[in-house]
Amino acid sequence: MVLPSAVYHTRNPRSSDYYHCVEDYFEIFVKINDEHSSRRYGFWRPYLEKGIYRYLDCGNLHNGFARVKCKDCSHEYLLAFSCKLRHF
């Protein structure tokens, strides 16, 4: 039995509901955070905002990519740069 070769599927972060939620409501969240959360959770930490915006740019070909090409069959694809955030 011959197993099919692995196929690379490009990531499309903008298609997820989570991405849309963050994109649509993050700025509102930042604005109201002081009123609703600062007493309980502390002040807003700027690195959080930087991380969110890096997440929104992650996997977007417009922000840079590498062209990956197989030397044997010449198949190629574009691999979008990652924000490298695993903790968000």
Image (cartoon, grey):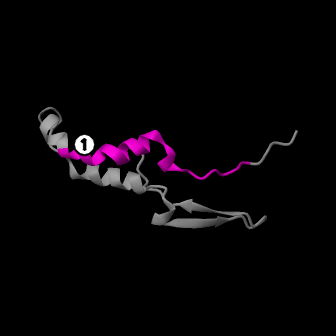
Residue 43, quarter of the rendered image:
top left
Q: Which residue is rendered at x = 51% and y = 46% of the image?
A: 15
Point out the residue furthest to the right here.
1
Q: Which residue is rendered at x = 38% and y = 41% of the image?
A: 21
Q: Is residue 69 magenta?
A: no
Element carrying mark 1 = helix
Residue 72, quarter of the rendered image:
bottom right
Give the residue at mark 1.
Answer: 29
Task: Return the residue nearer the eye: 11 or 22.
Answer: 22
Task: Return the residue nearer the eye: 58 or 47.
Answer: 58
Location of the C terminus by quadrant is top left
Location of the N terminus by quadrant is top right
Apparent side of residue 74 relative to residue 22 in the rendered image (left or right):
right
Give percent across and percent down for residue 47.
26, 52
Residue 17, quarter of the rendered image:
top left
Apparent side of residue 52 relative to residue 32 in the rendered image (left or right):
right
Apparent side of residue 74 relative to residue 50 in the rendered image (left or right):
right
Q: Is residue 27 magenta?
A: yes
Give percent across and percent down for residue 48.
27, 48
Give percent across and percent down for residue 9.
63, 50
Give the residues drawn in magenta, as a range.
6-31
